[in-house]
């Protein structure tokens, strides 16, 4: 059965792709969950119009994310943390704290997608750190954060 995807589905395709799937998968899973609809001739024609509009919108979003990545690269985020005499940190800074701090300063990023912080484990050392961020839509960037002791 030919279907039109209404959202990105891992291992199947991207939004507005026309795919051929088994009848059971389409009728029992994709269509009831409004993830796809049956591809009729008129739907496919409408799809082409939607696809071109969606591509323009995606380009605009990519440009905005790219400019945000460049702006963030020039900014340093400072975290005041509780620390001991020897510089050990009592509250490590993790992905969520970094993400919240970025979204606090750059709230427009909330509407463009999922901000993903590439950090294997929480930061437990005072000083400057460079962290890679995935903005979505294939755009990546780096930010600087600095952990300072709470006075």
Image (tube, rainbow, N blue to C red):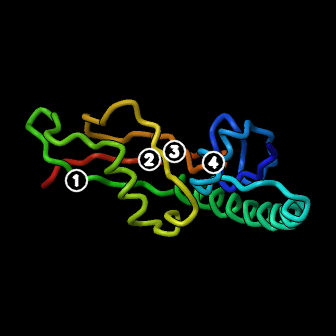
The quarter in which the C terminus is drawn is bottom left
The quarter in which the N terminus is drawn is top right
- Residue of label 3: 133
Among numbered discs 3 and 2, the one appearing first in the sequence: 3
Location of residue 12 (image quadrant): top right
Residue 80, labelled with which disc?
1
Residue 45 is left or right of residue 141, and the answer is right
Q: Would you say residue 139 is visible in this rendering?
A: no
Location of residue 55 (image quadrant): bottom right
Pointers 1 and 3 in contact (CB under 8 A)? no
Q: Position of residue 38 (x, y in %)?
A: 77, 54
Disc 3 from disc 4: Cα separation: 32 Å
Residue 144, labelled with which disc?
2
Among numbered discs 4 and 1, the one appearing first in the sequence: 4
- Residue of label 4: 30
Pointers 4 and 1 in contact (CB under 8 A)? no
Q: Would you place residue 61 above or below residue 118 in this image? A: below
> In the image, what residue occupies the spot 68% across and 53% down?
36
């Amino acid at each position: 059965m030919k279907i039109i995807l209404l959202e990105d589905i891992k291992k199947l395709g991207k939004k507005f792709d026309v795919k051929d799937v088994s009848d059971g998968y389409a009728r029992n899973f994709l269509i009831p969950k409004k993830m796809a609809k049956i591809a009729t001739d008129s739907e496919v024609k409408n799809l082409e119009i939607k696809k071109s509009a969606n591509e323009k919108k995606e380009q605009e979003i990519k440009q905005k994310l790219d400019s945000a990545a460049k702006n963030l690269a020039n900014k340093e985020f400072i975290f005041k943390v509780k620390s001991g005499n020897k510089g050990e940190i009592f509250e490590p800074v993790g992905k969520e704290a970094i993400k919240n701090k970025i979204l606090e300063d750059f709230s427009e990023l909330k509407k463009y997608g999922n901000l993903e912080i590439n950090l294997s484990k929480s930061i437990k050392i005072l000083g400057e750190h460079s962290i890679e961020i995935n903005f979505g839509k294939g755009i990546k960037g780096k930010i600087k954060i600095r952990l300072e002791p709470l006075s």
